Image (spheres, grey):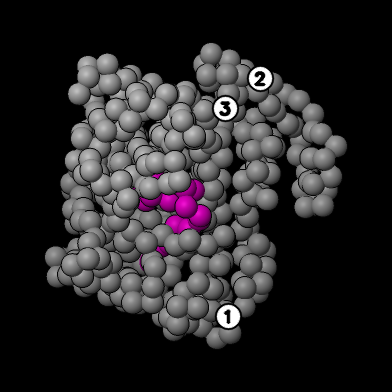
Amino acid sequence: MKQSTVKLLDDLLIDAIRLRSSDIHLQFENENLNIRFRIDGVLYDKKKIEKETANQLLSRIKVVSNLDLAEKRLPQDGKFWFKNADLRVSSFPTLYGEKIVIRILDRADKNFSLNILGFNERAKKEFERLISSSTGFIIVTGPTGSGKTTTLYSVLSSLDKNEKNIVTLEDPIEYSIDKITQSQINNEIGFTFASGIRSILRQDPDILMVGEIRDRETADVAIRASLTGHLVFSTMHTNDSVSAITRLIEMQIEPFLISAALSGVLSQRLVRKLCSQCCFETKLTVDENEILRKMNLEITKCYDAKGCASCNYIGYKGRVGIFELLILDSKLKSFISNNYDYNQILQHAIKNGFKLLVDDAIEKVNAGITSIKEILKTLM
């Protein structure tokens, strides 16, 4: 392999890590390879490379990630290390040639802490009280890429790992955490979330983290684990916190089991943070005013950012969570057991101080943390 190709890949990775990219996309468009970086959830064009050099670069990536150089018709998965980063490589056949995506898991840049996720003070105290229980079932929900895994890692990092046996089942393991037993499922050999939970229960666990509730069997085993004296965390893909209850019922989990086990549901999204070096107060556009009026929302201040060297002239730097935390009290549990109704639960929760995702989002707009454009793009 030519040294120039080795250097090209090294420089590409160094640049991506410097810019805090989560993924690098390499895709042929006619005769050129288009390289894009995903930064804070958004793809940006980085550079184009002519075909001969591009083929050498893709070959280099396949070599270091232990992919089959000759196989270009089937998708492949591999991985390699670069400096402090764990790089997951995925190849996929397309019309013009293989597309490769590199997921960057930069261990040097990861600090798992509840303090930096974006909770307001009230929500943080409520969530800390919830996760300090010795038993229960707690679900973190949201679409793909909403930061659910980061939230769960932050939860696990905050717990007492010296006096508790904490065990996880993940698909895949993204980061290792000291003093926690982490295991990766393997569906091909029958090591599923459901079978894994059953095995974990013979390992004298105090706390379990199940990567995702995907089916009835996993949900049933996780719930029953929480009812036998364990604290269980997991994730689901739903639009809001109340919908997690709907999803469990759709999985044919008995309502009395849900009400007995479920302690709380945290729903979340990620929004980009305005660059603190170049943000400024501004005014809403006519369209933004109209959208907020229709949603019956009001903001006191509005901010934007012009872009500067600190944020690579994007205007945003980093991301923050917006949250809604549903804690199940005795009345909500009764609703679920007797006659589940989405609106009934939602209205009762709101009367008792429950804040919707949009409420937390508006608070962050008023505080200058993010922009109204970012909120509308994420929640609309």
Residue nearer the viewer, 193 or 30: 30
Q: Is residue 320 on the magenta stretch? A: no
Which residue of the protein is positioned furthest toward the top in this rendering? 309
Q: Which residue is mark 3?
A: 316
Residue at 37%, 47% (x, y): give it: 92
Q: Residues within 10 Å of mark 1 (few under 14, many from 20)?
A: some
Q: Which residue is mark 2?
A: 306
Please say if the residues under marks 2 and 3 sit with CB atoms less than 8 Å apart: no
Give the side of residue 200 with respect to residue 300, left or right: left
Quadrant in which residue 103 is drawn: top left
Q: CA distance from mark 2 to mark 3?
A: 9 Å
Give the side of residue 128 with respect to residue 177, left or right: right
Residue 359: image location, x then y, percent: 66, 49
Please say if the residues under marks 1 and 2 sit with CB atoms less than 8 Å apart: no
Residue 13: image location, x then y, percent: 33, 25
Dot 2: element: loop
Residue at 68%, 44% (x, y): give it: 376
Name the amino acid type tagged 3: Tyr
Name the amino acid type tagged 1: Tyr
Dot 3: element: strand
Residue nearer the viewer, 302 or 217: 217
Q: Which residues are magenta?
A: 137-159
